[in-house]
Amino acid sequence: MPTAKPSLELLRSLTDEHVLRAIMEGERLTRTEIAALTGISKPTISDSVRRLTEAGVLVDTGERTTGRGRAGSYYSLVPETGAALVAEISPRGVRAEAVDAFGTVVAGAGAELGRAAGPEEAAAALREVAGELAGRMPLRCAVISAADPVDRRTGRLVQLPDEPFLVGDLDPVAVLAPFVPGDVLVDNDVNWSARAERDGGCASGVDDFVYLHLGEGLGAAVVADGEVRRGGSGLTGEIAHVITTGPDGSAVHFTEFFRETGLRQPGTTAIDVDALRASYGDVLPQLTDALRGVLLAMIALADPLLVVLGGTWGRDPEVLDALTRDSPAPREVTLATATLDTPELTGARTHAIDTLRTLIIQHATEQ
């Protein structure tokens, strides 16, 4: 049976994709450089560059190579290509940035929020920063990191008992619809942190691990076979209500440990990190027992090769030392502290860049 040959149109689309991806990585390249990077012949690359230039996707920058031989022209994406919106919704407020297809943050904006902010205040802050960035450049897609649980089907924030930062039933997808014509992806900040550590942190090369966030709030992300597992509704990793050992040895929900030890911020379930650190000398043995109970539950259910300790106090060396000292486990699991300073934004940004590049390529190859 004869093998079907790919159509000329398909071959051109594949070549155009290779050209665009090379330029997105290099920012500006000559046709000779693109041919060398892709392994595609110079005449084929020249045809692709011409098509993409005529389609208004690439532009001759006006720069030329120097030195001996014929000068080569540098090509890049047209400035109107647009950007992706990356935003974080947290007790610190709404922080947003516009990132282009080269991976460069080209603009930023922010708006303050209080811990007791409701959905109207949070929506107004998100609308404010999105409008500011959209007024400066076209936004083609958006990726949002939220400090609250997120419904995976709708992207709406979910209100659960004892969550320290609750903005209510906020719908970021609907809020951003007037500013972003493309997809809007919303996920929990701990999930984005786990992705960042997998891509360029202490979990690089590890396909099965648990990321434990220990800060003002408590959370976890489960990575299995290289993918973050979000569960049926998107609430995998909500560890605040895992049953563990309390300060007096009785069984309590993990979040209740901090109430019983007086380590919550006044009027909220948020952990008082400064007070916790100041009391390590007294409370660390009991805290270690509580953490160990959570870890054993995660290990038994998720079977990770690695547990990453992240969050403001999760990265403290005292915590890792206490957990690795005389800490029995049902099987061999490595513990490590997270290495990235803003992993939630890093993870969201990486996904936004990939999404933006895919949109640009799809638009260019469908013309």
Image: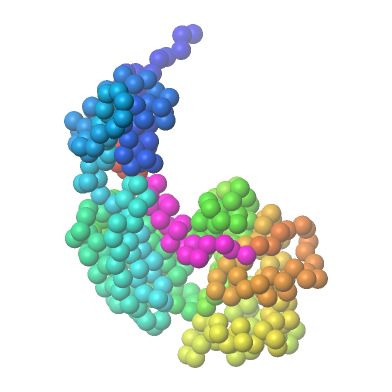
The x and y percentages for residue 206 are 62, 50
Instruction: From the top left corner, tell me how far across and down residue 130 is, in percent.
Output: 26, 64
Look at the image and tell me whether residue 42 can be seen. yes
Q: Which colour assignment does the render follow?
A: rainbow
Q: As drawn, which residue projects farthest toward the front?
A: 68
Q: Which of the image's four quarters has the C terminus?
A: top left
Identify the image quadrant of residue 30. top left
- What residue is drawn where x is 55% and y is 74%? 312
Q: Is residue 345 left or right of residue 23?
A: right
Please provide percent x and percent y for residue 56: 19, 36
Q: At 75% across and 68% down in the image, what residue appears?
A: 324
The correct choice, above or below, for 227 with respect to 57 in the image is below
Q: Residue furthest top?
A: 1
* Magenta portion: prevailing SS class: helix
- Give the camera-side residue of 357 and 125: 357
Residue 293 showing in the rendered view: no
Residue 292: in magenta span: no
Which stretch is magenta? Answer: 337-355
Between 16 and 119, the one nearer to me in the picture: 16
Q: In the figure, 348 relative to 147: above or below?
A: above
**In-image side of 215 versus 188 (left or right):** right
Name which residue lies at 62% across and 62% down: 308
* Residue at image point 40% right, 56% down: 349
